[in-house]
Amino acid sequence: MPAFLSVVLVFAWLGLSATFAAAQTDETICLETNEPESCFRAGASRLIGKGVEEDQALAAHYLARACEAGSAKGCEAAGQLYLRGMGVETDRSRALGFFLSACAGEISSACLMAGVLLEKREDGSQPALAELVGAREQYRMACEQGLGTGCYAAGVLYFDGRGGNKDLDISSQLFIRGCQAGSAKGCLRAGEALQHGYGLPKNPEQALMLYKAVCEAKLAAGCAAAAALFQERNGGEADLKQARHYYSLACKAGDDSSC
């Protein structure tokens, strides 16, 4: 079973105390009353085989019922099953619907997933403007709920002018928020904004601080950016030594062009 399901469903939502009797009771209550928590627990139990026989199809059924009854976490879990074809036919459209419902229930990871499905079509074709507008909205909702990856993703769309007008001021603020919320890519793009003046006053020193932090997070692009900035400063042998050091780190982190 995928790690995201085992961790999220088992430890965060279901717990380790499920018994056969409890699982059966949840299924009965769900079928008779559609009580959302019972439907969710019934689905989670069937998904992992806790207290009952593992059955992904039944898991999808109970989790979908949980969603329909108002369980946001049930919506997210059902979305993951439909996205991955676990117990059901793969259905990106239905998965998107579940993620949108979960996002409305303030589950930030579901907002992010909804944004991804809207922005990136399965066949690689260019999404329609309405889809990109929706992706911007979903990413920003993820950001508002504290998910740094959502801030970063929204920032990229604003920077590129996808889903609306290009807006460097908004994109730079989103990159900063993403960085503050723990997104290494957000920190990298915030550094680029500071280095080049994309929606922010130029500040190479602050940019360098961010690049170094990104490098410490083992993101090769951060190491390479720090190296290039040291090289551009032309501050003598000390800067060149630092440039060589960060190019070496970038190389070790997988950036062949820095080797």
Image (spheres, grey):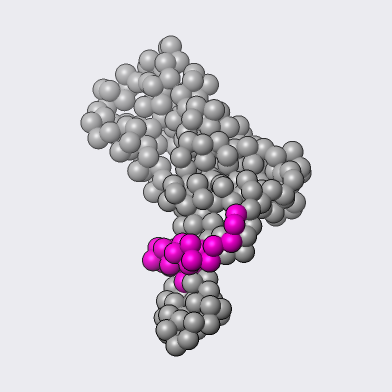
Q: Does the magenta stretch include residue 132?
A: no
Kindly tell me whether residue 82 is visible in this rendering: no
Q: Relative to residue 120, is residue 87 drawn left or right?
A: left
Residue at position x 62%, y 64% in the image: 196
Kindly tell me whether residue 246 is visible in this rendering: yes
Nearer to the camera, 149 or 120: 149
Nearer to the camera, 69 or 233: 233
Residue at position x 44%, y 88% in the image: 237
Q: Position of residue 252 (x, y in %)?
A: 42, 77
186 over 132 or under it: above or below? below
Residue at position x 44%, y 47% in the image: 181
Q: Which residue lies furthest to the bottom in this view?
A: 237
Image quadrant assignment for residue 249: bottom left
Nearer to the camera, 204 or 190: 204
235 over 220 or under it: above or below? below
Q: Relative to residue 57, is residue 25 drawn left or right?
A: left
Q: How many marks?
A: 0
Q: Position of residue 149 (x, y in %)?
A: 50, 48
Image quadrant assignment for residue 19: top left
Q: Is the magenta stretch mostly helix, strand or loop?
A: helix
Q: Where is residue 194 in the image (x, y as percent from the top left)?
A: 56, 60
168 over 34 or under it: above or below? below
Q: Where is residue 92 in the image (x, y as percent from the top left)?
A: 62, 41
Which residues are the magenta region? 200-224
Nearer to the camera, 21 or 211: 211
Residue at position x 26%, y 22% in the image: 21
Q: Does the magenta stretch include residue 212?
A: yes
